[in-house]
Image: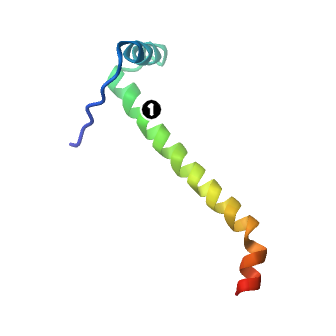
Amino acid sequence: MPALNVPFTDDEMEAVRAGAAEAEQSLRMFAHDAVLSAADQHKKRVREAAALIASRSSELNRRLA
């Protein structure tokens, strides 16, 4: 199974550990969920941007067709 080896500063690692503890998750599961959540948010922002561009350019697209 593919894996990541991500370096953190001591302060960053402390923050990640605190977040995992607050979420009552293992450090590994907390990091896993955070990465997937960030990837999903990125996809959502790209879809929203594409919809906005399509909406704003619809008149121009009609004239060019």
Q: Position of residue 15 (x, y in %)?
A: 44, 15
Q: Tell whether 52 sits left or right of 8.
A: right
Q: Which residue lies furthest to the left in this view?
A: 1
Q: Is residue 61 above or below residue 16?
A: below
Dot 1 corresponds to which residue?
Answer: 34
For the N terminus, the image quarter is: top left
Residue 47: name its quadrant: bottom right
Residue at the spot x=32%, y=26% of the render? 28
Work out whether residue 45 or residue 20 is closer to the camera in this orientation and state it: 45
Residue at the spot x=35%, y=18% of the render? 9
Residue at the spot x=25%, y=31% of the render? 5
Answer few, some or many: residues within 10 Å of disc 1's Cα (few below 14, many 20 plus, some between 14 and 19). Answer: few
Q: Where is residue 31 in the image (x, y as percent from the top left)?
A: 38, 28
Q: Where is residue 65 in the image (x, y as percent from the top left)?
A: 70, 87
Q: How many marks?
A: 1
Residue at the spot x=77%, y=84% of the render? 63
Circle 1: element type: helix
Q: Tell whether 60 sits left or right of 28.
A: right
Work out whether residue 10 or residue 41 is closer to the camera in this orientation and state it: 10
Q: Where is residue 3 in the image (x, y as percent from the top left)?
A: 24, 38
Q: In this view, does 57 lie above or below 33?
A: below
* Residue type at numbered disc 1: Ala
